[in-house]
Image (cartoon, helix red, strand yellow):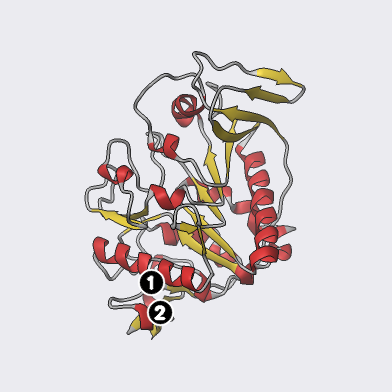
């Protein structure tokens, strides 16, 4: 049984040239090729915050009311939707997101001896940039981080559409995380095979207590998921109206017909997403203001968007810039 250990350089050409084969860490469990780990060499991260906070509780009332208390605005309606933090700029959002992540890292490293972090692709990775700056780059215990993807495009790791490549170039290559603690998909497999392989790996990591398990649901309970949101309200590769949003049994599933290219993807399911101890939903830009309003404002639509189905077992925090929150 073998595993591709990928050492990525700064260009796609160097990426392709540096693929090599090494023994798998999970060979006793696998019938197919295992997940790929990245060999990462890097630096570290840190932050502070300046923003207004909105504590948002669900929109079961006919109209949400925002009551201002100094710098804090609150809306109280029904079932909790989590905490909403609105920042004057995306830069301030990134600063606060870094502190939020670093604080959770310190907490879980002390409590569990490890920190399981799930990331998405897209603009979320850019928003993590402050983690690779002082003081966080030097204060976080990167050796205890274990990094996963909530979804991935089934493409080679040096492909421009790869979430792994995006995260490596902007984040993972800049931190000293052990290579074996980065869990990328096996891109040599089909979409179905890659999803099954990823789930097999997660089950192994649950057994070895790298990843926690939810006593309430029996699904893996990641310490934090750092998620973005598409302008159509999709999260992970769970799109509005797509059958995958209703998957209840699998931990990881796949599609060959994603509404957004590339068509072949794997994705965590909502039972896994919603078993998380913490979720940060990071949304920036005026192009997403309508969806933010539908999710957190006074919209009465009965058709839930995927982002509205995010309801973690633990804490949910929305990180919004002023443009994304402009219609609240």
Q: Position of residue 110 (x, y in %)?
A: 70, 65
Q: Are marks 1 and 2 in contact (CB under 8 Å)?
A: yes
**79 left or right, relative to 68:** left
Quadrant of image for the N terminus: bottom left
Could you classify mark 2 by the number of other residues whose Cα lies within 10 Å: few (under 14), some (14-19), or many (20 or more)? Answer: some
**103 left or right, relative to 291:** right
**Residue at position x 49%, y 40% in the image:** 311
Q: What is the secondary structure assignment of the residue under circle 1?
A: loop
Q: Position of residue 64 (x, y in %)?
A: 55, 17
Q: Is residue 191 above or below residue 292?
A: below
**Residue at the disc numbered 2:** 26
Q: Residue at the top extreme?
A: 62
Disc 1 versus disc 2: nearer the observer = 2
**Residue at position x 68%, y 64% in the image:** 111
Q: Position of residue 304 (x, y in %)?
A: 37, 30
Query: 204 or 285: nearer the eye?
Result: 204
Query: 35 or 58: nearer the eye?
Result: 58
**Residue at the disc numbered 1:** 35
Measured in 3D between alpha carbons, the distance from the residue under mark 1 to the one under mark 2, in whole angstroms, is: 8 Å
């Amino acid at each position: 049984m073998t595993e591709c250990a990928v050492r990525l350089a700064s260009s796609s050409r160097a990426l392709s040239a540096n693929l090599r084969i090494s023994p798998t860490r999970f060979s006793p469990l696998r019938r197919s090729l295992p997940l790929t780990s990245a060999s990462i060499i890097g630096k570290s991260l840190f932050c502070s915050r300046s923003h207004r906070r909105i504590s948002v509780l669900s929109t079961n009332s006919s109209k949400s009311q925002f009551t201002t208390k100094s710098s804090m605005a609150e809306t109280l309606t029904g079932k909790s939707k989590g905490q909403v933090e609105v920042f004057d700029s995306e830069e301030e959002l990134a600063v606060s997101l870094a502190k939020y992540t670093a604080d959770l890292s310190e907490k879980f490293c002390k409590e569990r001896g490890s920190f399981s972090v799930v990331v998405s692709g897209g603009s979320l990775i850019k928003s993590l940039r402050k983690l690779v700056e002082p003081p966080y780059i030097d204060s976080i215990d990167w050796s205890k981080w274990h990094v996963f993807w909530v979804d991935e495009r089934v493409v080679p790791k040096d492909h421009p559409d790869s979430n792994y490549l995006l995260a490596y170039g902007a984040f993972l290559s800049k931190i000293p995380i052990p290579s074996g603690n980065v869990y990328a998909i096996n891109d040599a497999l089909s979409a179905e095979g890659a999803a099954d392989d990823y789930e097999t790996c997660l089950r192994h990591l649950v057994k070895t207590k790298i990843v926690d398990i939810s006593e309430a649901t029996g699904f893996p309970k990641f310490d934090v998921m750092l998620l973005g949101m598409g302008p159509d309200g999709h999260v992970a590769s769970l799109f509005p109206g797509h059958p995958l949003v209703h998957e209840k049994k699998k931990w990881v599933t796949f599609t060959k017909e994603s509404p957004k290219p590339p068509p072949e993807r794997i994705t965590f399911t909502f039972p896994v997403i919603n078993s998380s101890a913490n979720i940060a939903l990071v949304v920036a830009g005026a192009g997403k203001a309508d969806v933010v309003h539908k999710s957190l404002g006074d919209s009465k639509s009965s058709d839930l968007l995927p982002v509205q189905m995010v309801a973690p077992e633990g804490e949910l925090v929305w990180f919004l810039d002023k443009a994304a929150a402009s219609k609240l």
